[in-house]
Amino acid sequence: MLDVQNVIKYTEMELVKREDHYALYDDNGQKIAASIDGCMYKLSEENCSEIFGIVDVEKLTKEYVDADPDLEIGTSEYQNAQVDFKEGFNRAMELNKDKLFTVEDMKKAIAMARKGSKERLHDGYGSFTQPIFVLNDTSSEEIIQSLQPPTEIEVEIVTTEIVIAKFHKAYTQSVYELDKDGCLILKKL
């Protein structure tokens, strides 16, 4: 008798962004998947880009234009709306190209610079002034680099644990879940 039971779990891995592709490494540093040919498992370029926060302008355009109930797919108005949206999006990106860091990024940099000791200064009359932060020895370059977009992100792979009971013995086998295109399903931690 064969009894199969599925238990979904997650396996942590490291997703690395290369110049021309993405690669996935296990905790031993072994490459197990890539978005280019040559590995046992395949990664979805779209899934990886989404994890790294890269905007798919084509997808965003389609979502925006399709949400307009006044536009009928295939009409010239629909196509013009797509062109206008893309041009507007690209122009906004161009205008904001010098605005590299978010408020959260700046808070992170300030926190890193402040890491060190909190001290109070003596005012010379027996009391202390407000606390001041003594900067640690982290270099400006290191702080700036910490704000750059990451090239490595911790991810998890959706894995199914298959339990097979056969002849009064139970066997388990982990199997990676695949999307409709046969690519591993990754989620950002």
Image: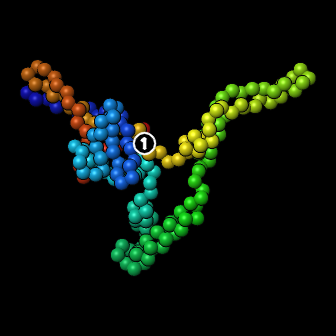
Q: Residue 84: x percent and y percent?
A: 48, 73
Residue nearest the observer in this picture, 174 or 77: 174
Q: Is residue 109 visible?
A: no
Residue nearest the observer in this picture, 164 or 102: 102
Up-down relation of residue 48 to residue 86 (above or below): above
Q: Is residue 110 visible?
A: yes
Taking the spot 24% from the left edge, 45% from the top edge, the residue there is 39
Horizontally, is 58 left or right of 126 in the view? Answer: left
Picture quadrant of residue 99 = bottom right
Horizontally, is 32 left or right of 77 in the view? Answer: left
Taking the spot 15% from the left edge, 28% from the top edge, the residue there is 164
Up-down relation of residue 145 to residue 74 (above or below): above
Q: Residue 161: x percent and y percent?
A: 24, 32
Q: Quadrant of the C terminus?
A: top left
At label 1, counting other C-alpha atoms closer than 10 Å, the crowd grade (few under 14, some 14-19, many 20 or more) is some
Residue with the mark numbered 1: 152
Q: Quadrant of the N terminus?
A: top left
Picture quadrant of residue 65 = bottom left
Q: Residue 91: x percent and y percent?
A: 54, 68
Horizontally, is 60 left or right of 165 in the view? Answer: right
Residue extending furthest toward the bottom: 76
Residue nearest the observer in this picture, 95 or 64: 95
Q: Amino acid at mark 1?
A: Glu
Picture quadrant of residue 158 = top left
All told, the count of numbered labels is: 1
Residue extending furthest toward the right: 125
Label 1 sits on a secondary structure element that is strand
Residue nearest the observer in this picture, 102 or 145: 145
Taking the spot 22% from the left edge, 36% from the top edge, the residue there is 175
Taking the spot 39% from the left edge, 47% from the top edge, the residue there is 17
